[in-house]
Amino acid sequence: MATKRERRERAREERLALHRRMARRRRLRQLAIRTIAPVVVILAVLAAYSFLGRHRSPPTPPKLVSGPVIDPATLPGILTGRAPWPPNTADLRARLDAIGLPALPAESFVLHIHQHLDVFVDGRPITVPALIGINQQERFLSPIHTHTPDGIVHVESPTQRTFSLGQFFDVWGVRFTPTCLGGYCAGSGKSLRVYVDGHLVVGDPRRVELFAHEEIVLAYGTMAELPSPIPSRYTFPAG
């Protein structure tokens, strides 16, 4: 049977062992905090950068390009009927020649940006089809084109240059003027309105310059038929 002194000594050793374990746990926690905290900060910065890069807020009204504008009525194969409109590539090469864009044998990425386009007619969303600006039979494509029917426009150019919204519709081969979209023209209380990042375009919408991660809306109809709210940004996939 342990003596009183032995019991006190054992209790003292147990307290010392407990203190050592607690001190070791504190050191491990501090080490973990010092190790994890920078990682958390880096991840937070990367997340913020990704968010800002994919969601461009509308700080300023859209920029309009200068210079002459092509009359869509002069282009071969222009569609002036009602939606929906197909990719319309039969006369693509001739339209590219007319508007001064190259017919590329493959994608080029000296300039590589994307926009998102929403089209509404009388309050109804209209599909922006896949393969606008891509002639699969003749194996060439425009620097402005679509791959999928989700409204994402790809600008993939072998040179740094300016591209406009009017050029995209000329590539598509759908009539687009300040007052008409395809077979829909202003009149009887209806008009064509164009928005970029939530800003109403004032001036010729064909001149809207294409920048990275723009959200572009074309809405034909009455004021009551406008989408509410007007789309002002889009979550772009990575890449």
Image (cartoon, rainbow, N blue to C red):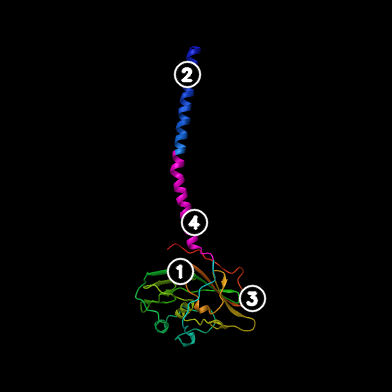
- Real-space CA distance between mark 1 and mark 2, rounded to the nearest whole angstrom: 74 Å
> What separation in Å lies between label 3 and label 1 (alpha carbons)?
29 Å
Q: Nearer the viewer, mark 1 or mark 4?
A: 4
Question: Which residue shows up at 60% across the image and 80% down it?
Answer: 191
Taking 179 as reference, is 26 above or below it? above
Would you say 193 lies left or right of 8 here?
Answer: right
For label 1, the crowd category at 10 Å Cα-Cα, with few meaning under 14, some 14 to 19 and many 20 or more, is: many
Identify residue for label 1.
Answer: 114
Mark 4–mark 3 Cα distance, whole angstroms, equals 36 Å
- Where is mark 4, residue-wise? 48
Instruction: Name the element at disc 2.
Output: helix
Q: Earlier in the sequence, mark 1 or mark 2?
A: 2
**Circle 3 residue:** 223
Q: Are marks 3 and 1 in contact (CB under 8 Å)?
A: no
Tell me the CA gap for discs 2 and 3: 87 Å
Of labels 2 and 4, earlier in sequence is: 2
What amino acid is labelled 3 in the image?
A: Met
Earlier-in-chain disc, 1 versus 4: 4
* 164 w.r.t. 45: above or below: below
Q: Residue furthest bottom?
A: 74
Identify the residue shown where x is 47% and y is 24%.
16
Q: Nearer the viewer, mark 1 or mark 2?
A: 1
Q: Earlier in the sequence, mark 4 or mark 3?
A: 4
Q: Specify the segment rendered in magenta.
A: 31-57
Q: Find numbered disc 1 in the image and state the secondary structure of the residue it sits on.
A: strand
Residue type marked 4: Ala
Residue drawn at point x = 47 percent, y = 54 percent: 45
Q: Is residue 89 one of those drawn in magenta?
A: no
Q: Which residue is mark 2?
A: 10
Badge 3: residue crowd in 10 Å (few <14, some 14–19, many ≥20): some
